[in-house]
Amino acid sequence: MSRDLNALYIHDLSGFARALRSDLAGQGTSPPGHQAMLGLIARAAGFRNYQQLRADAPQPVISKPVARALRYFDGQGRLVSWPAGTMTQGLCLWRFWAGLSPGRDYAERDLNAALKDWHLFGDHVLLRRSLIDHRLMARARDGSWYRRIEQAPPPDALAMIRG
């Protein structure tokens, strides 16, 4: 089951807590299940049920390419596998670009160490080459240093960086 993000603004936290406590007291001795708890929270917040809360909550607007690219990352923000599409690859690389320090020269060893921490599929060399191919990093001819190329990320890249 996917995890949906639902915004919940509670105007009166004291009233919310009071309503939730009252609903929990009416449930009996066993703690409510997950779905029942969602319903109790929604009713305490002034909604008829959890479905109404979800329908009324503002949904974040992200493009389809960004949504597709975000599926390649796990909960800790690590890239799980390398996407097949070039456009999706480019969007994924913006997360790595954002994690690199601006203006810093990286030795290959240091860049490799950072990239190894940010992915799970074991090919940091592919990521390093792709950062250069997508013009997100520059490299000395002799490979002695790598540097992030400073630029303003496009809107989809900003959405990727925010995650």
Image (cartoon, helix red, strand yellow):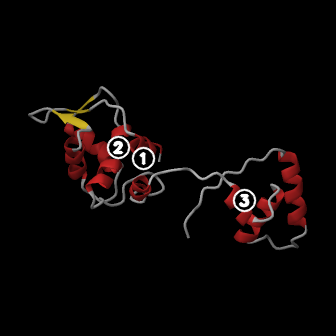
Task: Tell me which amino acid carries mark 2.
Answer: Trp
Q: Which residue was labeled with disc 3?
A: 53
Most distant residue in the top direction: 103
Residue under the image location 82 percent in, 46 percent down:
13
**Tag 2–tag 1 contact (CB < 8 Å):** yes
Residue 10 placement (x, y as % from top left)? 78, 47
Q: Determine whether, in the image, residue 31 is placed left or right of residue 71.
A: right
* Circle 3/circle 2 CB separation < 8 Å: no
Task: First in sequence, mark 3 or 2: give its number.
Answer: 3
Label 2 and label 1: CA atoms lie apart by: 7 Å
Inter-mark Cα distance, 3 to 2: 33 Å
Mark nearer the N terminus (3 vs 1): 3
Please tell me which of labels 2 and 1 falls first in the chain.
Answer: 2
Residue in the picture at 45% in, 52% down: 63
With respect to residue 115, does 88 lie above or below?
below
Residue 145, horizontal then vertical, whole percent = 18, 32
Report the disc number at residue 94.
Answer: 2
Q: Which of marks 3 and 2 is in front?
A: 3
Q: In this view, does 59 lie to the left or right of 160?
A: right
Label 3: state its secondary structure: helix
- Residue 134 position in % (x across, y down): 23, 43
Can you identify the residue that label 1 sits on? 160
The residue under label 3 is which amino acid type? Leu
